[in-house]
Each structure stands twice: as C-alpha cells, then as structure tokens.
Amino acid sequence: MECEILIREVKGRMVKKLAKCIREYKAVSIATPILVLLEVVMECIIPFITAALVNNIKAGCGMKTIIGYGLALTGMALLSLTFGSVAGITCSTASCGLAKNLRKDMFYKVQQFSFENIDKFSTSSLVTRLTTDVTNVQMAYMMIIRMAVRCPFMLIFAFVMAFVMGGKMAFIFLLVAPILGVGLAIITAKVMPLFNNVFKKYDRINSSIQENIKGIRVVKSYVREEHEKEKFGAAAEDVCKDFTLAERILAINNPLMQFCLYAVMVFVLSFGSYTIITSRGLDLDVGQFSALLTYSFMILMSLMMISMVFVMITMATESCKRIVEVLDEESALQNPENPVYEVKDGSVDFDGVCFKYSKNAERNTLSDIDLHIKSGQTVGIIGGTGSSKSSLVQLISRLYDVTEGSVKVGGLDVRSYDIESLRNQVAVVLQKNILFSGTIKDNLRWGNKNATDEEMVEACKLAQADEFISTFPDGYDTYIEQGGANVSGGQKQRLCIARALLKKPKILIMDDSTSAVDTKTDSLIRKAMREYIPETTKIVIAQRISSVLDADMIIVMEGGKIGAVGTHDELLKTNEVYKDLYIMQNKGGAEDEQ
C-alpha cells in the first residue's frame, strides 16, 4: 500500500514538473479538449438526426422536410469538421511547443552540469533523452489533449444515444466492452515492461554510434569496420527484438477489436432485423436501427483508440521519468550564497588537497597536494601517464571540487567565487581541444566575443597560427567543420592557443597543448606567451622536458602525488625520475640527429 502511494506521489510530481514546460502553450492546450468535445457532440447528434430523417421519409414527408433535415445535417457536419480541424491545429501547436520547451529546458540544465553530472548520465544517454524521449512525450501529449479526451466523451455520448435509440438492445455493449477492456489491459501490462527496457538499449545504440563516428579514423586505420558493424548490429538487433515482441503483443489489438465489432454487428443485425419484422417497426424502426449501428461503430472505435492512447502513454511514461531525472538533477557545483565576482590575481595555492572522482572510489586520484604558485609565474608539470596531472589543474577552474583541503586562486578558496567569473579568468588549452563548426573568426571569438580583426590576427601570430591561416583561400573566414575535422592536429592546437590568448586570463593552463607541434614552434609559442601575457600565471603540462625548461618552477607528478618541485637544474641533481626522463629524451634526440 505504501509502495503504491509512493508511486502515485512520484508520478504526480513528474506530471507537475512536465506541466511547467507547457508555459506559453497553455491556451492552445486548454482550447484543444474544448474543441474536441464540441466535435464529439456534433458527431453524436448527426446519427440521431439521420434516424429522424429516415423515419420521416418512411412516413411520407415532403421535400421541404427533407431539405430542412439535409441543411441541419450539413451544418452539423461542417461544424464538426471545423471543430476537428481547429483542434488539430491547436493540438499540434501545443505538443510541438511542449517538445520545444522540454528540449530547451533540458539543454539549459545540461549546460549547468558539472563533469560529475555528465559522467553520471553519459553523453549518449543525454542525447537519447533530448531526442527520442522528448518525441515520445510529444506524441503522448498530443494524444492526451485530443484522443484521450475525444474517446471517453465519444464512448459516453454513444452509449447514452445507443440506449435512447435501441433500448434493451444496447445492453450488448455492456457485455462486449468489458471483454475488450480486459483484453486491452492485459496487452498494456505485457507491453509496458518491454518499452521500459528499450530506452536503455537506445542509450547503448547512441553510444555505439557516437564512439564509432568520433573514432572513425582509428576504425579505418585498423580496418575494424566489420567489427564495428557487428557491434552495432548486435545492439540494433537487441532493440529490434524487444520492439518486435511488443508489436506482436499489440497486434492482438486488431483481431480482438474485429471480434467485438463483428459480434456486435451480428447481434444488432440479426436481433434488430427480427425486432423490426416481428413488431412491424413499433419497438424498433429502420431509422433507429441505422443509428444503433452507427453508435456501435463509434463505441468500439473509441475503445480501440483508448487502447492506442494507453500504449503511447505507457511508452512515454518511461521517457517522462528519464526527462524529469535530467530536469531534477542539480549540478554538483553550486555558487555560494554571496559569491565573489572579481579574481584579484593569478596566484594558486593547494593546501592539503585530496581528490577522487567518485565518492565511492576506494583510492584518491590526488593525495596530500601542497603547492603554492605566485601570480605571473610559469610552472611546468611533468609526469607519466596516469600521474593525475590533468586532474590537478582541473581543480583550479573548479571543474571538480576537492574531496579534502582547499584550492585558492587570488588568495580565496575557489568555492567562494562565482563559477562563471572564476572560469572567465582561467583559460584552459587541452591536448584534444575542440573547435566548433563556424569560421575561424567565430572560434577565436570564444576567447573574446568582442575581439577586433587586428586582435585576432595578433593572437594568431603569437600562437604561430597566422602563417597557415593566410594560406587558406578565405583566410580568417575559412569555415571549420564540426570538431575541426578539416584542419590538422597541430593547426587545431594553435588555433585553440590563440583563442585562449584572446581571453587574456589571469591563469593560462596548457594541458599538453603543444604535443602536435614541432619543438621550434613550441619554443616560439612559449616566447610569445612570456611577452604577450607576462602577468598571467602560466601552467604548462608537457611530455617534453624542452617545453618546460625555462619554467620558474617544475613539478614532477608521481601516482597522484607531488614527487618533486624545483627548477630544471635543481631537479637534474635531486630527482631521479626527472633526470632519467631528460637523459632519455636527449639521447633520443641525439640519435635522431645522427
């Protein structure tokens, strides 16, 4: 009992949450069922008037009476058509508007998510929720405000009119309706769990597609097309299997409906004809008989449409849950009550920092980090794969929150800042940075939306990007494909560095962002940064020691901890890891020269 109450409360809250997304489409949402009700009234009166016309013709009425009835029927048919057409317009406007608002609200919500929230849902699942799930809710809402209103009203009106016209004969509907109703209830109960499982499998399909397209170059390089086809085929087959089973169960709807329909027709035709003949039209005349047949079709069609509504709502219920999960999700990172909006300088302090990506993780990703960087310093970070170099710098712009200790920027804990203000003063250039579809200028203006052409050219010259941009026919107006697919890795990195320079941040983090450029270009970029943004704190994560040789301080990371801190000369004398790495890289360079 308590479980049922809880389920009802959850569903009620879910409906309220989705109802808030109707907003400016409330008027058309309310108008649709009213128009549908008027349409149903007209449709149910037409058989009644037709029966009266048939009886009058049988009694030998004149043309004037026939024309009168004909005009009345034409008027009601036109009204029914008008109400139905307008209802269709308002219904589509309301349902499409709801879908638009749902996608908008979900997308805005996702933009507020921290990396922790994104990891929780996964990218493929969020894509499914924004597309397939919203479409299911849109279709369900369209049915709810139109079909779910039309069918019950039609059922009630048709039942009443059937009793008015057919008397005791209408009791056949009371026998048939429960048979159809029980059958539909069983079908719905069988289908619902199948639809609930399908959406999780949709997530896996989207994940497979996303992974394949993103890594298409690797797939082709290793000739793994057949493997990827088999993997996708298995996921698609799994979804197909569930949908096929669901469709097979739903297919029972049609024969069940046909059985009830023909059972009623046989009864009404045989018993009705018998009644007309034996009573000579006194208990049931031809007009009433024709109206009764029409109402029987209306009743049974309404029951069938109700079953379709139930199926669509069943399918959409799981989609609603998934959408509300996103809308209810609160970002793991929140602004404080009275946030600080100004970052004083680019100093960075790690005091007793420990960090792990998941609260349930057994081990810390970072442990016992104590580090103090003065504003304007250039800091290099060296370490092997998995030493948590990137994890360290992600805490500075508060992409994640520390598990223990504190990270300070400009003398204040990063958790005391307005998140947007903090991130506006911390620019990050990643090894695999992203360019967005648009011109080179559009991408550069991510760093400064008000940047002039001269400022963009200057930043690109400093990032050693102007040279290759000038070779493009359209120059800075060259269109960049999604993800920067039409530029090389080195070109992409240099454009991302130029974008970061335009931001003129107090802290610039370069996470192995010159790995795809040669050492000469790397040296020129570092020189440009020293001269162009001398007061900016520069943190450089690198695999090549040559990239951090001139740093004020070099940090050696080992297993999520700081192994050593010092200048290049100091670390060569005191740290074996750094010394071995330096010797190995220089030896490789010497061999290459030979």
Image: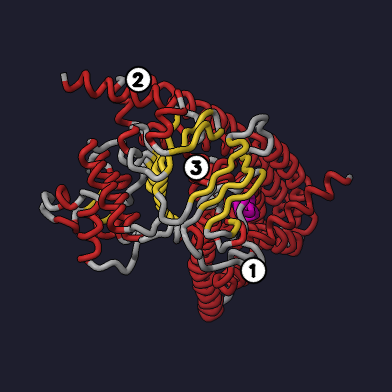
Q: Which residues, given as a range, are shown in magenta? A: 324-332
Q: Which of the labelled discs sits on residue 123, or is there none?
A: 3
Q: Nearer the viewer, mark 1 or mark 3?
A: 1
Q: CA distance from mark 3 to mark 2?
A: 25 Å
Amino acid bearing label 2: Glu
Crowding near pointer 3: few (<14 within 10 Å), some, many (20+)? Answer: some
551 on left or right of 116:
left
Residue, disc 2: 226
Q: Quadrant location of residue 552?
A: top left
In-front residue for pair 308/441? 441
Crowding near pointer 2: few (<14 within 10 Å), some, many (20+)? Answer: few
In-front residue for pair 555/386? 555
**Element type where label 2 sits in the image:** helix
Q: Position of residue 14 (x, y in %)?
A: 69, 55
400 on left or right of 451:
right
Magenta segment: does it hold 581?
no
**Element type where label 1 sits in the image:** loop
Residue, disc 1: 338
Q: Residue at x 11, y 49 (%)?
A: 471
Q: CA distance from mark 1 to mark 3?
A: 32 Å
Q: Residue at x 31, y 49 (%)?
A: 496
